[in-house]
Image: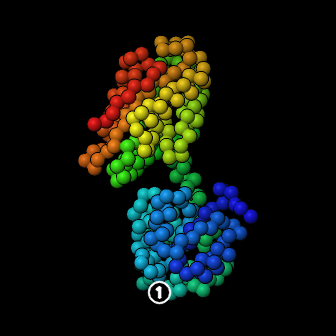
């Protein structure tokens, strides 16, 4: 039976096909199982595919052994939080100490004892899911249910490093709800909160790519990080967001830009180098936002970062 996306995903890394088959048979009733027969192959897959919830990793393999693979996993921001259980036919005190020192959470011995395998996997899957829930609560804005400023900062730093590494452009949008203080004064803070939630929804609906991030930047400000996106592409997304908020047609009797709620949006784009910092892109997007406001609001302005 095919499992849906809510079932936890486990990656088995082992050079022995029979070991993969045995573990798969034990775990497949409750989990989605994928496998790799070498550390090198596993790393390539983890760089390009959805991440697993747990990794079962053989210690002794040709090429990269389990310790080297685990060290790579824990040094990579994208994979460092995936729990790793080592699987091995020999567990000495020295081996255990080394495994835990490189970041493993547990050991499973060969030959496999079905009850032990299932119990330990279940324990660490549950711990991972609780941790994920707590982490999600820490990075989600309570009012709008989209990522908060903390998550924005994390994501921007990660995409900056990735763009430096691969030479990709990426764009940043900063946006402000026009005359929002006047909206709150006129309609009350409850309607102000409702307005921000509606705008957050319109922004996220305008960004269909899963690789993009929309966040509440602070107060009535929002931000979008668009990886692998040029200035022209970023401007197109900004126009789509601008129109989506206009289509909400939320009345704003006190606005000096329109009779309904509108946004001003600044767009900046850069292909960063190792000598630059993310703050330079934020500054450019902020300048573009100021230009949009100074030019009458309810519009998009763009600047290309140097």
Say left or right for 29 vs 247: right
Q: Residue furthest left?
A: 275
The residue positioned 50% from the left and 63% from the top of the image is 45
Image location (x, y in percent) of residue 213: 49, 42
Which quarter shows the N terminus? bottom right
Q: Is residue 39 above or below residue 257?
A: below
Q: Is residue 209 above or below residue 5?
A: above
Which residue does the numbered mark 1 point to in the structure image? 92
Q: On the picture, is 71 further left or further right than 139?
A: left
Residue 52 versus residue 107: which sits nearer the camera?
52
Q: Residue furthest right?
A: 1
- Neighbourhood count class around disc 1 (C-alpha, 10 Å): few under 14, some 14–19, many 20 upward: few
Residue displayed at 48% across by 74% down = 38
Q: Is residue 87 visible?
A: yes
Quarter of the rendering containing residue 30: bottom right
What residue lies at 54% left-to-right and 20% top-to-bottom? Answer: 261
Q: How many marks?
A: 1
Instruction: Tell me where residue 23 appears, x and y as whole percent.
Output: 63, 76
Residue shown at 53% from the left, 86% from the top? 89
**Position of 204 relative to 167 (above/below):** above
* Image height of 291 relative to 118, above or below: above
- The quadrant in which the C terminus is found is top left
Q: Position of residue 103 (x, y in %)?
A: 44, 70
Looking at the picture, tell me which residue is in the foreground, 107 or 242.
242
Q: Is residue 99 visible?
A: no
Label 1: element kind: loop
């Amino acid at each position: 039976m095919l499992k849906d996306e809510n079932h936890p995903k486990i990656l088995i890394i082992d050079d022995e096909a029979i070991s993969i088959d045995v573990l798969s048979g034990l775990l497949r009733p409750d989990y989605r199982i994928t496998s790799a027969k070498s550390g090198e192959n596993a790393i390539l897959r983890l760089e390009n595919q959805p991440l697993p919830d747990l990794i079962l990793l053989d210690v002794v393999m040709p090429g990269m052994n389990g310790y080297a693979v685990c060290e790579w996993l824990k040094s990579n921001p994208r994979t460092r939080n995936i729990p790793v259980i080592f699987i091995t036919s020999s567990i000495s005190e020295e081996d255990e100490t080394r495994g835990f020192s490189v970041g493993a959470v547990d050991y499973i011995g060969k030959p496999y004892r079905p009850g032990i395998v299932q119990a330990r996997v279940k324990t660490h899957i549950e711990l991972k899911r609780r941790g994920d829930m707590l982490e999600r609560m820490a990075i989600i804005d309570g009012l709008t249910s989209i990522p908060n400023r903390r998550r924005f900062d994390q994501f921007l730093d990660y995409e900056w490093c990735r763009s430096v590494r691969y030479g990709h452009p990426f764009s940043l949008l900063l946006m402000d709800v026009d005359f929002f203080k006047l909206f709150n004064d006129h309609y009350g803070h409850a309607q102000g909160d409702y307005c921000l939630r509606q705008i957050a929804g319109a922004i996220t609906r305008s960004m269909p790519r899963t690789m993009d991030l929309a966040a509440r930047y602070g107060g009535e400000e929002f931000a979008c990080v668009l990886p692998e996106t040029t200035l022209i592409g970023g401007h197109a997304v900004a126009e789509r967001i601008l129109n989506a908020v206009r289509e909400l047609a939320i009345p704003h009797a006190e606005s000096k830009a329109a009779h309904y709620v509108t946004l001003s949006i600044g767009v900046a784009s850069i292909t960063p180098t190792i000598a630059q910092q993310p703050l330079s892109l934020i500054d450019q997007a902020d300048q573009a936002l100021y230009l949009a406001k100074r030019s009458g609001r309810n519009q998009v302005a763009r600047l290309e970062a140097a």
